[in-house]
Image: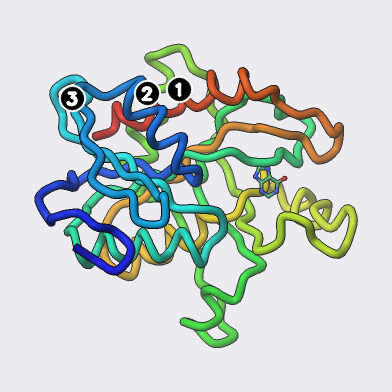
Amino acid sequence: MSLHIGAAKEEIAETVLLPGDPLRAEFLAHELLDNPHCYNNVRGMYGFTGFFKGKRVSIQGTGMGMPSHAIYVHELIHGYGVKQLIRIGSCGAIQPQLGLMDIILATGACTDSSFNDQRFGGHTFAPVADWGLLHKAYVHAEKAGIAVHPGNILSTDQFYGPVPGDWKKWAKYQVLAIEMETAALYTLAAENNVAALGILTVSDHLETGELLSSEEREKGFVRMGELALSLA
Ligand code: HPA
């Protein structure tokens, strides 16, 4: 039992998938896991444990943005001994070669947040994916015939930022897409010597303004969920 997760220690698996939306956690648990068991509904932030191809895995909602995401990641690591954390989320693409529904493996995550500044005080830490998980995800995706784009992303604090087109400065440095959580995940994983990976599906494109329908979003989430579960 931790402050925001009302589960007994043994109820949560060593590998946890982390969608932002708790209803996605519930949907994926019922869609993809055998014997799913809900271990948390504190603040409606559902968490489920079940089996994927015989392996015990959990799926925990985290909410949007680094402050919320970091609460769950911290408690999963410190309260429940979780060893592999895999974010599955959506992102806005900022490169022309990316289309809706494309999957990105976040090799690194830049941020405009003060999350790391509070740790490194003016120096820059480079939050990166766990190589083992990243490599495994790439190989599994290739085998499954899923095209993936490995590359750098931006974790922003502001979905509705004050400067229109500000994303272009990140695009110039080959950043692929924008989301709101992975930099905190990678930093906390490094701090605690556990493995983390961010897998993202492109839900919108900032240049073209295209958006996924809710049906396509659901399909994208199942595909990404299966890939993430195969890493357990
Ligand atoms: N910006 C930030 N987070 C996001 C976006 C975006 O455009 N799309 C999905 N998550």
Q: Residues within 10 Å of mark 1 (few under 14, many from 20)?
A: some
In the image, 201: left or right of 35?
A: right
Q: Is residue 92 above or below residue 81?
A: above
Camera-nearest residue between 105 and 184? 184
Q: Nearer the viewer, mark 2 or mark 1?
A: 1
Residue contact between numbered discs 1 and 3, judged by CB atoms under 8 Å: no
Quadrant housing the C terminus: top left
Identify the residue at horizontal 40%, vertical 13% (top origin): 144
Mark 1 or 3, nearer chain start: 3
Rounded to the nearest angstrom, the CA distance separating label 2 from label 3 is 16 Å
* Three-letter code, disc 1: Val
SS state under label 1 = helix
Q: Which mark is residue 144?
A: none
Residue under numbered circle 3: 35
Residue 88 point in image, percent of width and height: 46, 39
Residue 98 point in image, percent of width and height: 71, 29
In the image, 173: left or right of 62?
A: right
In the image, 82: left or right of 99?
A: left
Residue under numbered circle 2: 226
Identify the residue at horizontal 48%, vertical 62% (top origin): 68
Residue under numbered circle 1: 222
Residue 176 in view in this figure: no
